[in-house]
Amino acid sequence: MEITCVFTDLAGFTSLMEGADLDQGLPVLNDYLDGMCRIVRQHKGTIDKIVGDALHVFFGAPLAQPDHAQRAVTAALAMDNYARCFVTSDAAQAVSFGGTRIGVHTGSAVVGNFGGEAFFDYTAHGDTVNTAARMESVNRHFGTSICVTGATVEHCDDISFRPMASLRLKGKTQHVKAFEALIPDQLDPALQSAYLSAYKKMASGDPQAQTAFEALKQQYPEDPLTCFHVERLAAGSHGEEIIMTKK
């Protein structure tokens, strides 16, 4: 069946648990996870599991949701907004709480009860699940917060995205189009327009792409995707295709 998977991860979680007083850190983590799970439920998602600080979620099962891709990205945007607010709270700052990364992918998966007589759980298996997890980790390399595949983007209306790259994930032979989902009230139309223009040049092999991205960086020095492409183009890379050597 077709579903949309969402993976979240908390930056610096291992260091947080090693360096913080657990009596202080764990309640903060629980508050964070409670808020994240609440958003999933509000958007009618299924919470697959919580692994440490990471949340594994899918939309489209057990009940059919024709708009599962749109629901998933809308939920991801809400979780991103919540996480950004949460990290500024006094309790989070007291334990150096990190930022949240989110990956989203749509595709076929096997969903059902898996396990044995002693234990089983309702979960999803397949490459779709693995790809969503990879998209979450892609954010770490690009400096973004929400990475969504083209397979999801094509099912989403009224949500703004911008292209990140065409990625060949480690261990894969096919490229995956990656997009950044944008929070509406944080979208700068001028940045979006200039970025898309520079990206189009890069994707087509136009030698002026580097100049376009460098000019954009002068205006928006804190934009992570712009900075990423300036660096890779300056290092001699060309086009939009990137081979990911790490998960």
Image (cartoon, rainbow, N blue to C red):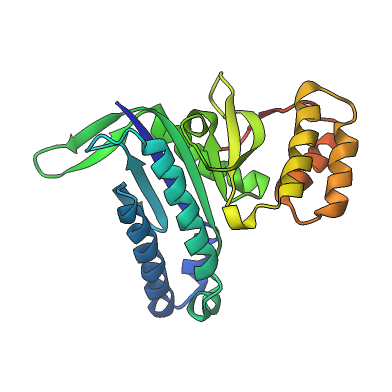
Residues 135 and 225: in front is 225
Quick check: 152 above or below 140? above
Image point 87% across, 35% down: which residue? 210
Q: Position of residue 34 (x, y in %)?
A: 34, 65
Image point 84% across, 46% down: which residue? 216
Quarter holding residue 236 = top right
Q: How many numbered badges does the structure rendering display?
A: 0
Which residue is farthest top? 173
Which residue is farthest left? 117
* Relative horizontal placement of residue 205, taking residue 165 as reference (left or right): right
Q: Position of residue 246 (x, y in %)?
A: 60, 37
Q: Examine the rendering and report whether any part of residue 234 can be seen.
A: no
Q: Examine the rendering and report whether any part of residue 179 can be seen.
A: yes
Quick check: 159 above or below 55? above
Quarter holding residue 127 = top left
Q: Position of residue 166 (x, y in %)?
A: 64, 28
Residues 10 and 102: in front is 102
* Relative horizontal placement of residue 92, taking residue 167 as reference (left or right): left
* Relative horizontal placement of residue 40, taking residue 78 as reference (left or right): left
Q: Quadrant of the C terminus?
A: top right
Image point 90% across, 30% down: which residue? 208
Q: Quadrant of the N terminus?
A: top left
Q: Position of residue 86 (x, y in %)?
A: 49, 69
